[in-house]
Image (spheres, rainbow, N blue to C red):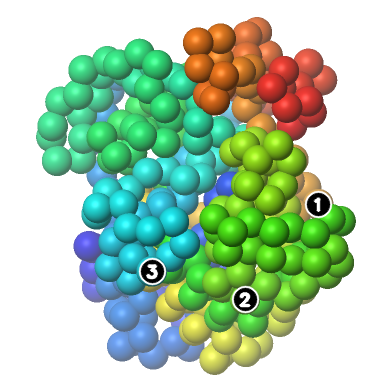
Amino acid sequence: MVRQEKKPRSRRRKIFLAGCAGLLVTALAGGGIALFAYHHLQANIDTVDINQALGEDRPAPLPTGAQDILVLGSDSRSGVNGDLAGGNVGGTARSDTAMVVHIPQGRARATVVSIPRDTLVTRPACTTAKGKQLHQAERVMFNSIYTAGGPTCVVKTVETMTGLRMNHYVEVDFAGFKDLVDAMGGVDITVDRPIDDSYSGLKLAAGTHTLDGTTALAFVRTRHGVGDGSDLGRIGLQQQFVLALVSQLQRQNTLNDPVRLYRIADASTKSLTTDSGLGSLTSLASFAQSMRGLGSSATDTLMLPVAYDRIDPNRVVPAEPQDQQLWQALREDKPIPAAARKSPAHGTA
């Protein structure tokens, strides 16, 4: 855990907002926050040194100045997460939600690509944050990479898949996500059909609901009560929630409410793990300032094109050539082709 001793600038009022497959992390550094509160918030943030672990064998930064952020939602049920639906998983964790957030130069729009957790991929040889070496492995389920190698191996895998360098890494855990939603006073969501999922504990009638933290977590985790019951249906709910959360934060007059501002800042930073480059309130605030014009209406959400695996129909694999068309469009900051928005396993992303 990293502490920052530098005092904040006066009148600093900036919001950092990152989106996660339902899962978005908000961190704030507010003008006029007392020094003790600043250090408390700073101490909440965990960091991991992605650059040191991965070394130089990575894609080059995009010449356009675009930024790519890997956002993960961790499904650990250790500690305060142990009572969540689904039970204890023995102290381990997986990347329950994974999103690549691509922000072109100018920061006026963003593309969010969700990677289904059940996707079979090749995990490249990688080094964990603790220095452990892992050999390349074929046909590995994407969400298990976090369990085996932690965030650095997930970043390495995503960079190998996409050809995009992940400029930043953001992770949020279950308990922190709940607290963030509660600190906001809930998030409004509209569903066209009733949802009843005994696994996640979610039961909603059709219509508009204000979801508290517990219900919001069930919403972004549910899959058995929607679509074909697969992870592909869950991704749609996660993306819907991310956009609703962003929109609600923009509507709320948070900066003029110091009590709400601090509660949201405290909840979000407690749930937050970032790369070392974002591991301070000042860094988060500076990044937020560069994205102040970005809103939910300028955010394009889609899913990595996938097809059902021929050997195991319960798993999916990246669909070719659609997946490479998608990543190439992002690398070149060009419009995403219509074909790259189609998943043979699930229609339009």
Badge 3 or badge 2: first in the primary sequence: 3
> Mark 1 packing: few (<14 Cα in 10 Å), some, or many (20+)?
few
For residue 297, the mark is 1
Q: Mark 1 or mark 2, which is nearer the start of the sequence?
A: 2
Position of residue 239 measured from the top left corner of the image (x, y, whole percent)? 68, 48
Residue 194 screen position, x and y as percent: 80, 59
User: For mark 2, what is the residue?
Assistant: 212
Quadrant where the N terminus lies?
bottom left
Residue at the (25%, 24%) spot, across then down: 126
Please report contact status of discs 2 and 1: CB closer than 8 Å, yes or no.
Answer: no
Which residue does the numbered mark 3 point to in the structure image?
A: 83
The residue tagged with tag 3: helix, strand or loop?
loop
- In the rendered image, the vertical position of residue 249 relative to residue 331, given as above or below: below
Q: Disc 3 or 1, which lies upstream in sequence?
A: 3
Q: Residue at x 51, y 70 (%)?
A: 178
Q: Is residue 28 left or right of residue 343?
A: left
Identity, as a three-letter code, of the amino acid under mark 2: Asp
Can the viewer see residue 17 in this picture?
A: no
